[in-house]
Image (spheres, rainbow, N blue to C red):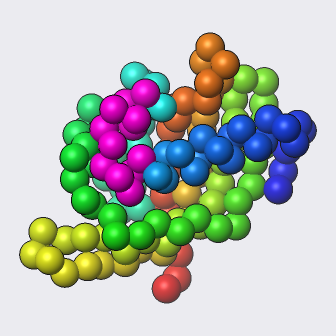
Amino acid sequence: MLTNNSAESGTIASAVAALRDAMLAGDGAALDAMTMDELTYGHSNSRLEDKAAFVSGLDGKNAFKAIDLSDHSFQLVGDVAIARHTFDCVNNLPDGKTSTAHIRVLQVWKSVDGAWKLLARQASPLPV
């Protein structure tokens, strides 16, 4: 874990976990609250979403059956945090089937009024 403030890295880790939980729950209000209006959300297939598309794509939906995050690292640069992790998930598909993803994720968080908010996310595929 890369960090220059272990106490603050704990709050970033909590923010990353809260984002995962909100994505699993399809909690649009929580996703809206923890992301910046300027959010750019990059998927591993190069598709980009803004905040509105990201939130509405998950709000009230059961898009994920499971999300597991591992191999965490954090780096603080002033009021910005860089979080990296491996993201393994089981996606719920509209036809009742599932698919999986095994990707590496970079997240950029910014401290706003004492709370960490997601500003950017980019994923890249990993070998299965």
Q: Quadrant of residue 112?
A: top right
Where residue 24 appears, x then y in whole percent?
A: 38, 57
* 93 versus 77 height, above or below: below
Residue found at x 48% / y 32%:
34
- The outermost residue toward the top is 113
128 on left or right of 31 = right
Q: Which residues are magenta?
A: 22-33
Q: Position of residue 128 (x, y in %)?
A: 49, 85
Q: Relative to residue 72, is residue 107 drawn left or right? A: left
On-image quarter of the N terminus: bottom right
Q: Is residue 115 above or below residue 121?
A: above
Pick whichever, 21 or 83, lies toward us.
21
Residue 63 image point, x, y percent: 27, 61
**Residue 44 vs residue 2: left or right?**
left
For the point 33% across and 43% down, the residue is 27
Residue drawn at point x = 48 percent, y = 53 percent: 20
| Residue depicted at 55% across the width and 57% down the height | 105
Residue 3: horizontal and vertical position, in percent? 85, 44
Furthest residue in direction left, as rendered: 95
Whether 4 is drawn above or below 84: the answer is above
- Magenta region, main secondary structure: helix
Q: Confirm whether residue 50 shows in the render.
A: no
Does 103 appear in magenta?
no
Total tally of numbered discs in the picture? 0
The answer to whether residue 67 is visible is: yes
